[in-house]
Image (cartoon, grey):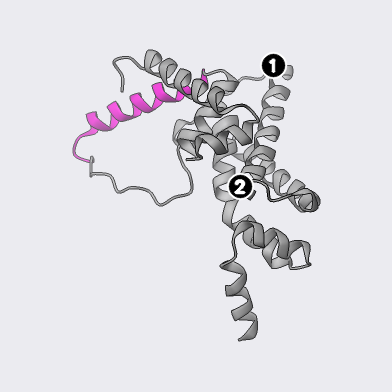
Amino acid sequence: MQNSVVAQQVLSLGDNALVAAYLEGNEVAFEVLVQRYQNKLVNYINGITHDYDRSLDLCQDAFIRVFKNAHRYQGKYQFSTWLYRIATNLAIDELRRRERKGRFFFYNVMDLFQSGEPSVPLPDCRHCPEKKLDQKEKADRLEVAIGSLSEKYKLAFVLKEVQGLSYAETSRVLNISLGTVKSRIHRAKMLLREKLAGVL
């Protein structure tokens, strides 16, 4: 009974308090952080790398870095900002490694927009196959358009518009100014609009 109460107390802690508890020897606190962020982080990394299996590995690498370097976390910014910065660096390293190897990937756009949240119920389209086909064609075009964005625009766009971070959080994760974040997101939207003219 006492263990159950303690577990509930740990679950109710904020991120910074969980980091502090982990540093004091509470391993359950670290497990709660992993459970709280792992799905979002895998989907975020997958939105950049478009390789789900590799994203699982990179997510694990991110948490290993947190595990080893938790004592360096100062709590100046939100824990999620620090975590996303680690994940972003790992994802960028992965993209650059691929470029060096000359590898090319086809993207799954639906994975890009999955955030681990409950799905929104969609109308039943079983009786209109042409509508299904139309939606798939749009998704395919969107997939290609987002995949064609340069790294700097894609990262800002995915963090802000897909992961739902604020402009300020995106700025801290990417270590660029707020104005640069807004500019890159605006430019990403303009590029997508041009690429998807007449489609969406």
Dot 2, how many residues are within 10 Å of its Cα: few (below 14), some (14-19), or many (20+)? some
Q: Residue at x 58, y 30 (%)?
A: 48
Q: Quadrant of the C terminus?
A: top left
**Secondary structure that dominates the magenta span:** helix
Residue behind mark 2? 80
Asked whether residue 144 is in view, the answer is: no
Image disc number at residue 102: 1
Residue 13: x, y in percent? 60, 65
Q: Are marks 2 and 1 in contact (CB under 8 Å)?
A: no
What is the three-letter code of the residue carrying label 1? Gly
Q: Residue at x 49, y 25 (%)?
A: 182
The magenta segment is: 126-148
Image disc number at residue 125: none
Residue 80: x, y in percent? 61, 47
Q: Quadrant of residue 172?
A: top right
Residue 95: x, y in percent? 67, 25
Residue ranking furthest to the left: 127
Relative to 146, does residue 26 appear above or below in the rendering? below
| Tag 1 secondary structure | loop
Could you tell whether 84 is left or right of 66 in the image?
Answer: left
Dot 1, how many residues are within 10 Å of its Cα: few (below 14), some (14-19), or many (20+)? few
Asked whether residue 47 is in view, the answer is: yes
Whether residue 162 is in magenta: the answer is no
Residue 58: x, y in percent? 68, 40
| Tag 2 secondary structure | helix
What is the three-letter code of the residue carrying label 2? Ser
Whether residue 135 is in magenta: the answer is yes
Depth check, front residue: 61 or 153: 153
Q: Quadrant of residue 14?
A: bottom right
Q: Residue at x 47, y 20 (%)?
A: 188
Q: Quadrant of residue 155?
A: top right
Q: How many marks?
A: 2
